[in-house]
Image (cartoon, grey):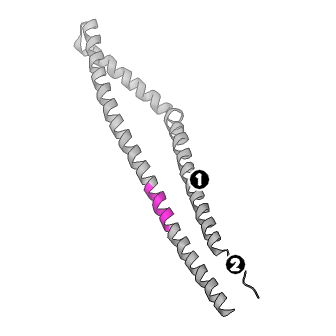
Amino acid sequence: MMETIKQTGGKIMESLADYAELSVQIAALKTADKGAKITSGFFTVVILTIVFLFSLLLISIGAALLISFAMHHLWAGFFIVGAFYTLLGIVLIVLRQKLITKPLLNQIIPALVNIAEKAGETIEKAQDKIEDKLKLEKQPD
């Protein structure tokens, strides 16, 4: 009887150690996954922003020069392009909640929920393994 209790206690301690180790590994993997996604997303946004701004600058200069030649005044084209961007900026400020904030949140929140669901599934699998280890054969009395 005492030997059975010792074996059972040993198996429980071993299972608890395995559970703790798996919990630490899961936490590390979740952290690494979130960090990698955030970092890659950040660098993607930075690179695309640089390319977009450079393209926009060149197109704006071209449009300003085209308007300037059409109006026969160099300053007129740059003034019109500047006024267009000022108006665009005002519209974006007024509609920022609808055009920027909500669409970003609609993309970020499902990604975070997906990560949490994957972590929950991993934890459930680890718990099932531990429960399987803890299933002891009944000892004859």
Estimate how packed mark 2 is, as few (under 14), some (14 to 19) or many (20 or more) residues with alpha carbons within 10 Å: few
Q: Tell me the residue that label 1 is attached to.
A: 117
Above or below, 32 against 43 in this view is below
Does the magenta stretch mainly form a helix, a strand or a loop?
Answer: helix
> Residue visible at 55% across and 78% down?
14
> Residue visible at 64% across and 91% down?
3
Asked which secondary structure carries label 2, the reply is loop
- Point out residue 10 in the picture as x, y percentages from the top left corner: 58, 83
- Point out residue 42 in the picture as x, y percentages from the top left corner: 38, 44
> Residue visible at 49% across and 67% down?
24
Estimate how packed mark 1 is, as few (under 14), some (14 to 19) or many (20 or more) residues with alpha carbons within 10 Å: few
Q: Nearer the viewer, residue 72 or 30?
A: 30
Give the residue type at disc 1: Glu
Above or below, 126 against 33 in this view is below
Q: Nearer the viewer, residue 81 or 4?
A: 4
- Residue 74, by quadrant, is top left
Look at the image and tell me in which quarter the N terminus lies. Answer: bottom right
> Residue visible at 60% across and 57% down?
121
Residue 137's disc is 2
Q: Which residues are magenta?
A: 24-32
Give the residue type at disc 2: Glu
Q: Is residue 119 left or right of residue 47?
A: right
Asked which secondary structure carries label 1, the reply is helix
Q: Residue furthest front?
A: 140
Q: Is residue 26 left or right of residue 78?
A: right
Q: Is residue 138 left or right of residue 98?
A: right
Q: Is residue 74 left or right of residue 140?
A: left
Task: Tell me, yes or no, whether the highlighted magenta stretch contains residue 137.
Answer: no
Look at the image and tell me in which quarter the C terminus lies. Answer: bottom right
- Residue 52, by quadrant, is top left
